[in-house]
Amino acid sequence: MTFPTDLEIARAATATPMAEIAATMGIGEHLLQPYGSDLAKIRLDAIDELSDRPKAKYVVVTAITPTPLGEGKTTTSVGLGQAMQHIGKNAIVSLRQPSMGPTFGIKGGAAGGGYSQVIPMELLNLHLTGDFHAVTAAHNLLAAMVDNHLHHGNELGLEVDNITWRRVLDVNDRALRNIVIGLGGHMDGVTRQSGFDITAASEVMAILALATSAADMRTRLGRIVVGYTRDGEPVTAEQIGGAGSMAVIMRDALNPNLLQTLEGTPVIVHAGPFGNIAHGNSSVVGDLVGIRAGEYLITEAGFGADMGAERFFNIKCRASGLVPDAAVLVATVRALKVHSGKYHVVAGRPLPDELLAENPDDVIAGAANLRKQIENVKAHGVTPVVAINAFPTDHESEHEVIRRVAEEMGARVAVCTHFSDGGAGATALAEAVVEACEDDTTFRYLYDDSDSLTTKIETVATRIYGAERVQISLPASRQLRTYEDNGYGSMPVCIAKTHLSISGDPTLRGAPTGHTLHVREVRASVGAGFVYPICGTMSTMPGLAKSPAASRIDFDDDGQIIGLS
């Protein structure tokens, strides 16, 4: 019997009216902005109106280091939310919104899968209520205002070769990554190098995800650094005069989106910052609504625990003031086999036949990754629960290996079949999470705000990535010193690195130790409040304070390219 596609399952579902979904959260219709019959935004007034209600238990869903296929964090988050209803608990799920770039690429949609999906899945995957377009418009408005400032005399003294604010769009288009703008006559602007990045990587998106209110968003937008003067002084969006207009464009986008699962569990979907560049978590305002709207708030952090969960703990929780009660760590047989170093998985291609054969020894060989990610969760004082996301090609002996490893590390564990069975397939996980939330834990950040930026980088590298040392290039050292001199030293660090390894090297599987984390440069996203150490080759780092491009394009008097150096 052929299993139906995700789209077929979603289209066969009968949605509960939005007002009824909101009512289960204690949210009245006066707080909803309807977008058709199956979708609504929640007004931020809900945060104050719900403030006298008890806080939910706060659960983050993370994972072992994934294969390029992903290991099912969203599906597990949805399945867990549905399973809570099966055991008599009231849960809210809080997720990121997907970018259309990956949606139209190999990755496809991001609404969960099988019988653990968010509906309506077409709207979720195809620009939803337009939040991504608002981010795109606000970002590009500022870019246009920068160029207009140059055209009208450059009163602030921006150095043309050190303008850091590029443009964005929400599709993949490699031909626009690096471009020359301002070609043509005098009225067509100043000719210079620039480029486009994907909207999910915009600093405006990171600000949307971390803002706690409209006023906070407005302040953060004003702090955006668009470039530097010849003397190295930062020039901000406030100085350019763009922050107020950007905030107006983003007014409705700041309101979280309300959807539901196939089984009628409320789902807040809001913001979508990249997970290997930005902090990879859904919005703070969404969680500030959800934390008072049920007994359990289940949110998801991008990629593995060394990436999204570390940033959830040290960046998002700092911004929101919320304290997690437990963490779900999604693990799969196939990913642990890949971490044995014996297999190579490529997105869009079938899995190797030998990977699907019963072989618990390969699971054991890759289990170091699971152990390390459990350690990474426990390093923050949070109780871990391992969710074995079961596939039909798995074998019971392989699940038993994962169970044994998890329990040896002091973690609860449950096998889940929520993809095929919906919430009923994750009730064991739900019961384990409920138990974990009752444990006595003391949540702690990995580092203090007062620590130097170098200390913060070294702490994350050695304690989370398993690095023996950190090697910071001379330009990066100078950038760190400059940022601390400019008052950015109290910011958390958001290390941009590969998501395919705990280390900074995507070829290193399992839980590598004794390696060196190479920091080649450091940038600052002042509006969002991050400092970004960059490791490896991260090509899309938009909207961030950075050094001028190493190359220079030369033009003649008519604006024609005559050389590249």
Image: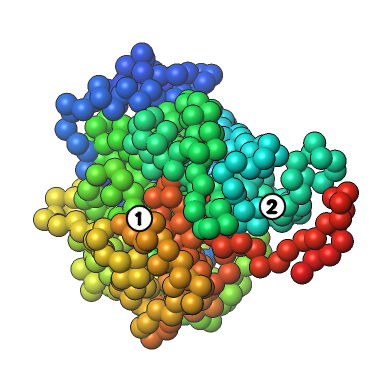
In screen coordinates, is 277 left or right of 367? right
Nearer-the-camera pick, 511 or 171: 171
Label 2: how many Cα within 10 Å (few below 14, some 14–19, many 20+): some
Label 1: how many Cα within 10 Å (few below 14, some 14–19, many 20+): few
In 3D space, how far apart are the residues under numbered discs 2 and 1 (Cα atoms)? 28 Å
Query: Residue extending furthest left?
Result: 440
Residue at the spot 85% in from the left edge and 41% down from the top edge: 185
**Residue pointed to by mark 1:** 487
Q: Where is residue 304 in the image (x, y as percent from the top left)?
A: 41, 62
Q: Residue 194 carries which label?
A: 2
Disc 2 vs disc 1: Cβ atoms closer than 8 Å? no
The image quadrant where one finds the C terminus is bottom right
Is residue 321 positioned above or below 453 on the image? above
- Report the amino acid beneath label 2: Ser
State which tag comes first along the sequence, 2 or 1: 2
Nearer-the-camera pick, 517 or 42: 517
Q: Position of residue 445 (x, y in %)?
A: 24, 59
